[in-house]
Amino acid sequence: MQKGQLGHGDTIQRDRPTVVSELLKYKIVRAGAGRSHTVVMTEDGISLSFGWNKHGQLGSGSVRNEIESSPVRCLVSEVKNIACGADFTVWLTSAEGASILTAGLPQYGQLGHGTDNEYNTKDSSVRLAYEAQPRPRAIASLSGETIVKVACGTNHTVAVDSNGYVYTWGFGGYGRLGHREQKDEWAPRRVDVFQRHNVLPPDAVISAVLLSFGNPGDTCKRKR
């Protein structure tokens, strides 16, 4: 496709499933896809990515679009799970103090680091931009928690810890974060209904694309 998200090192459209030859040497156990990028995980905890990288969503440490050399290695290790939003990526790892890492576009706080990285493009301009985060970074506020599940919507994230508590952050329009207010959250915030009742078991399946709190197509749902 146009952004190289199919992983073949070109931008040719393919109408039927085609083996990604560069991945044949790996045993791929998980995959996730964003707007124009793809991330995969191997059985031994390696993560690779390919596609559009304007915001650093490939997690390779740069914002170069490396179509010719795709897939590229993500700068994470001991990976247990992956999830993709439109222009960002989340990794769960078994590394101590870094159970969840993010990279990509921070515009709505969906990376969970307490900022949207907004800045003026020129000193005399009111045109705003958002500084890309191309290197995966651990979410400091969750360093003491073991995150076991994660899912992403277009511009928001939901995660579950080993105690069954649910956290959401990112774009808060239409109540999709579950906090009874339409406010963006720049850092993980526990969802009150689960905090009081702790009703979500750690082995629950979570999704950020079905209706529960807000609009269909971009919200969070829990399933037993």
Image (cartoon, rainbow, N blue to C red):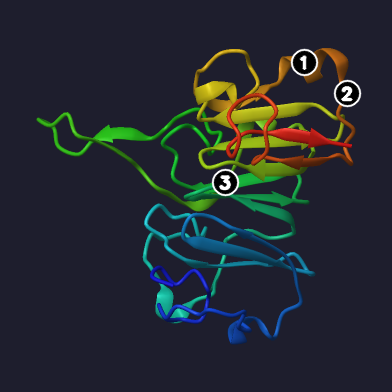
**Residue 199 bears which disc, if any?**
2
Residue 98 appears in the rendering: no
Q: CA distance from mark 1 to mark 3?
A: 26 Å
Disc on the earlier residue, 1 or 2: 1
Q: Residue 122: x percent and y percent?
A: 14, 37
Mark 1 and mark 3 residues within 8 Å of each other at the beta carbon: no
**Residue 193 bears which disc, if any?**
1
Direction from residue 105 to residue 174 in the image, left or right:
right
Residue at point 73% right, 51% down?
A: 93
Disc on the earlier residue, 3 or 2: 3
Q: Give the amino acid at mark 1.
A: Val
Q: Residue 208: x percent and y percent?
A: 66, 39
For label 1, the SS is helix
Q: Residue furthest left?
A: 124
Q: CA distance from mark 1 to mark 2?
A: 9 Å
**Residue 102 bears which disc, if any?**
3
Mark 1 and mark 2 residues within 8 Å of each other at the beta carbon: yes
